[in-house]
Image (cartoon, grey):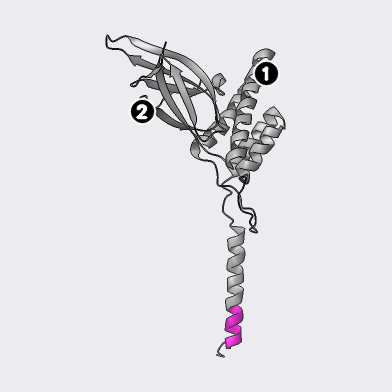
Amino acid sequence: MPRSSPINAVVSLMLGMLLLGQAAWAAKPADPLAPTRASLDALQSCLGPSEALKTLRKGLLWGWGRPGAPPTLLDKQPAPPPGPDYSESLDTEVKACAAAVQLNDEQQKQAALNAIRKDIEIKAADCFKFGMSRKVPVVITTVRGDKVESGWQVFYKWSCASLLQPQELRVPQLTSPAKVELPPGVYSFRAEKRNASGQLETVAPTEIAVGSAQYVPLELAIP
């Protein structure tokens, strides 16, 4: 039986490597940004095109260059996918938009859709300023008169998803300060505490926009 020549062995090796390369190319990994792209597409389908959505799409899928950053000759790489909380907020906006368009009352419908649009504008502005998706630190203090008072529990909920009755969550630490990191958007904060006699004191809900700043300070005034 004739032996294979060295040339035939090299050719066989090269063909094998080529076939392996083609198989690897065919089995491309899943796009990690596919869920983000799907959420953005769904929001555009529900709300229509807008500059805010266009800005947010570019930032979340490719990232915005920060002012003063050094130039680069490297090809632009996709942005890292948003974290779980940010992705969940996009998904909830999609669900809230779908619920809003089903409303029969035109005034209620437009109010709900405008709340979603405002939330997207806040996300887009924050994304443009800081380069891509992020969670924004919120630092909450409780103040009685001109004095900071500690020991208050702070609760918050996302205002954009009011149609879906979002769950109210508690900030882990007591004031002051209490700290929480949130995706950009509009949130409602309140606080409560039992005084020495066991009575529950409360601070009425305050709605604020979270975004476009390194961190957001929030002062809740005790009545």
Most distant residue in the left direction: 197
Q: Which quadrant holds the N terminus?
A: bottom right
Q: Mark 2 — residue?
A: 173
Highlighted magenta segment, given as a residue range: 5-12
The residue that appears at 45% across and 21% down in the rendered structure is: 219
Examine the image and state in which quarter residue 151 appears: top left
Of residues 165 and 133, which is closer to you in this image?
133
From what the image shows, is residue 91 above or below residue 115? below
Q: How many labels does the image show?
A: 2
What's under tag 1, amino acid-wise? Gln
Examine the image and state in which quarter residue 223 appears: top left
From what the image shows, is residue 133 above or below residue 103? below
Magenta stretch: residue 6 in it?
A: yes
Residue 168, can we see it?
no
Residue 5 place in picture, x, y as percent = 58, 88
Q: Mark 1 — residue?
A: 110
The residue that appears at 56% across and 54% down in the rendered structure is: 29
Of residues 5 and 181, which is closer to you in this image?
181
Q: Earlier in the sequence, mark 2 or mark 1?
A: 1
Of residues 58 and 167, which is closer to you in this image?
58
Residue 92 place in picture, x, y as percent = 56, 29
Q: Secondary structure of the magenta portion, mostly?
A: helix
Magenta stretch: residue 125 in it?
A: no
Residue 214 place in picture, x, y as percent = 52, 36
Q: How far apart are marks 2 and 1 (CA)?
A: 37 Å
